[in-house]
Image (cartoon, rainbow, N blue to C red):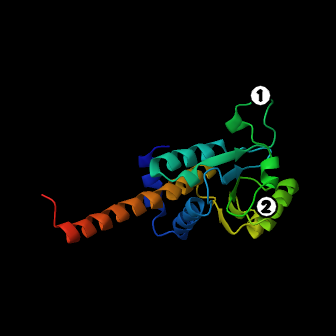
């Protein structure tokens, strides 16, 4: 999905409360991890969120927000997997304050995942969720968003990841504009 398709989805959802909720979840993804590597993305045993992880990594690079770079947590990484694909569930047990656990689950989260999410929350990690309306998972999350039936789960992931990057880019533009106005006020307009 390219930027034009994301823009089309945004236009279709304009005025919808879901799009504003996607922006809030995107902002939480961008601001709650306090250090690079502190955004942990996990799915279910049947659904590894490769797609969302790749898009968040792209948004991290494009926006310049290192904290948005995700760590994919896998249920069963194969032996000999490269380091970025070898992070297992033990990483969830080590989650702490200043880190964010982002659960991306199209289907209902199984009990072992819910237990790990609950434990991570108790240790101070922020819990975010993008799901298919999983009430138990949503109850554990600080912020959760269910993808509506009218939108594919894939499209929901694209929109949330785009929202995660957009605020940082806008903030940098706003900062640059303010800095330029300040410099103009101090030194006079540039030629």
Q: Residues within 10 Å of mark 1 (few under 14, many from 20)?
A: few
For residue 113, what is the image quadrant?
bottom right
For residue 130, what is the image quadrant?
bottom right
Pick whichever, 78 or 186, lies toward us: 186
Q: Residue at x 59, y 52 (%)?
A: 157
Q: Which residue is mark 2?
A: 120
For residue 120, what is the image quadrant?
bottom right
Where does the image place residue 128, in percent across and percent down from the top left?
A: 68, 62
Where does the image place residue 63, in percent across and percent down from the top left?
A: 46, 52
Q: Residues within 10 Å of mark 2 (few under 14, many from 20)?
A: many
Q: Could you tell whether 191 is left or right of 41 in the image?
A: left
The answer to the question of whether label 1 and label 2 lie on touching residues, with beta carbons closer than 8 A, is no
Q: Residue at x 46, y 47 (%)?
A: 62
- Sequence-earlier tag: 1 or 2: 1
Where does the image place residue 89, in percent across and percent down from the top left?
A: 81, 47
Q: Secondary structure at mark 1?
A: loop
Q: Secondary structure at mark 2?
A: helix
| Residue 25: mark in rendering | none
Q: Residue at x 77, y 67 (%)?
A: 140
Residue 131 visible in this rendered orientation of the protein: no
Q: Could you tell whether 105 is left or right of 167 in the image?
A: right
Q: Estimate the spatial distance between the alpha carbons at disc 1 and disc 2, rounded to whole Å.
A: 27 Å
Is 137 above or below relative to 50?
A: below
Which residue extends farthest left? 191
Pick whichever, 90 or 141, lies toward us: 90
Q: Which residue is mark 1?
A: 80
Q: Residue at x 36, y 60 (%)?
A: 173
Residue 125 visible in this rendered orientation of the protein: yes
Is 49 above or below relative to 103?
A: above
């Amino acid at each position: 999905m390219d930027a034009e398709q994301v823009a089309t989805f945004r236009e279709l959802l304009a005025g919808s409360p879901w799009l504003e909720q996607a922006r809030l979840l995107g902002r939480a993804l961008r601001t709650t991890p306090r250090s690079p590597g502190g955004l942990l993305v996990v799915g279910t045993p049947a659904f590894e969120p490769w797609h969302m992880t790749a898009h968040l990594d792209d948004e991290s690079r494009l926006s310049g927000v290192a904290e948005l770079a995700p760590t994919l947590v896998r249920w069963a990484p194969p032996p000999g997997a490269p380091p970025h694909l070898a992070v297992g569930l033990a990483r969830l047990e080590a989650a702490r304050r200043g880190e964010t656990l982002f659960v991306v689950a199209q289907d209902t989260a199984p009990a072992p995942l819910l237990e790990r999410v609950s434990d991570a929350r108790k240790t101070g990690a922020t819990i975010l969720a993008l799901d298919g309306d999983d009430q138990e998972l949503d109850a554990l999350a600080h912020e959760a968003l269910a993808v509506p039936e009218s939108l594919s789960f894939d499209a929901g992931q694209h929109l949330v990841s785009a929202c995660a990057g957009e605020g940082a880019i806008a903030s940098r533009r706003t900062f640059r504009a303010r800095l330029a106005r300040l410099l103009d006020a101090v030194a006079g307009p540039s030629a």
